[in-house]
Amino acid sequence: MFNEFLGLGFALINFILMLIMYKVFGKTGLFAWVAISTVLANIQVTKTIEILALTATLGNSLYASTFLATDILNEKYGKKDARKAVWLGFASLLIMVVVMQFGLKFIPAESDIADDSLHTIFGLVPQIALGSMIAYLASQHIDVIIFSAIRKVFPKDSQFWIRNNGSTLISQLIDTLIFTSIAFYGVFPFDIWLEIFISTYILKFIVTVLATPFGYMAKAIKPIDEKQV
């Protein structure tokens, strides 16, 4: 049960850190969080773990936090800022991929101890990043659209959980299907791929539900920089 307890704690830490970024830096902090977490999640996803008796990729809770961040932006600042965050995350991931592929081409010194590890991690990144970027753009834009559509039907502040969970659970399903199909095609046997797909979505489902209270906390937060305006 070590991975399960660690995963729960890790998810909570992610959301707490996101709230701190928002409290201190306002919506700029959420933009930064989307960029940072998108890049780190795509590094973590190269590691597979055993959790809930299933094989899953790491990085699910970190990646899921980007959906909460864009939902908060959509809720408090509007669809335009939410879409801006989506494109910022995409640009950050693209820059990481390009820069690291150049970095891998350099011939290491005889004293180098990092080159093999970098190749192990970032050698997988192009295929993973391609799947992630396509899945990211599709699912995040769908999330923004669905969130806005649900808000028309459930506009009350108390109904934020419906908007957040409804949009995220649908968009995360699309994201998981696209990402695992592209990123892990030919990498794992079909039965392992299917297990990763199912476990990944289950974990994202759990994290999305866990994120709901933090969404309400974010709604109540008055960022420091906005207090000074």
Image: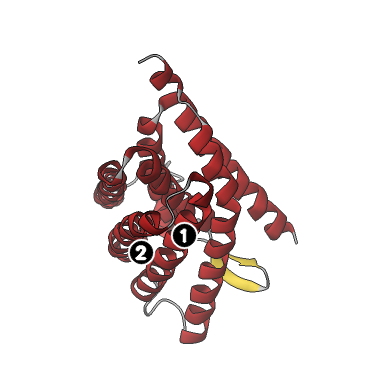
- Cα distance in 3D space between marks 1 and 2: 8 Å
Q: Nearer the viewer, residue 212 or 28?
A: 212
Residue 224 picture quarter:
top left
Question: From the viewer's perspective, is residue 22 above or below residue 101?
Answer: above
Asked if labels 2 and 1 touch by Cβ distance under 8 angstroms, the answer is yes
- Whole-percent x, y for residue 3 in the image: 68, 59
Using a 10 Å C-alpha cutoff, classify the residue at mark 1 as few (fewer than 14 neighbours), some (14 to 19) or many (20 or more): many
Q: Residues within 10 Å of mark 2 (few under 14, many from 20)?
A: many
Q: Is residue 168 left or right of residue 104?
A: right
* Residue 215: x %, y % from top left: 52, 44
The quadrant of the picture occupied by the C terminus is: top left
Where does residue 21 sit, x and y in percent of width and height? 47, 31
| Quarter that holds the N terminus | bottom right
- Along the line of sight, the residue nearer the viewer: 111 or 5: 5
Q: Amino acid at mark 2?
A: Ile
* Numbered badge on residue 128: 2
Residue 1 visible from this viewpoint: yes
Seen at 49% across and 81% down, the residue is 194
Q: Secondary structure at mark 2?
A: helix
Q: Looking at the image, can residue 44 be seen? A: no
In this figure, which residue is indicated by the disc labeled 1?
Answer: 45
Residue 4 placed where, x, y %? 69, 59
| Identity of the residue drawn at 35% across and 61% down | 146
Type of residue at label 1? Val
Query: Please, is residue 40 above or below residue 141 in the view?
Result: above
Q: Secondary structure at mark 1?
A: loop
In this image, 21 relative to 52: left or right?
left
The residue under the point 52% across, 62% down is 204
Q: Which tag, 1 or 2, sits closer to the chain's start?
A: 1
Q: Nearer the viewer, residue 9 or 225?
A: 225
Residue 14: image quadrant is top right
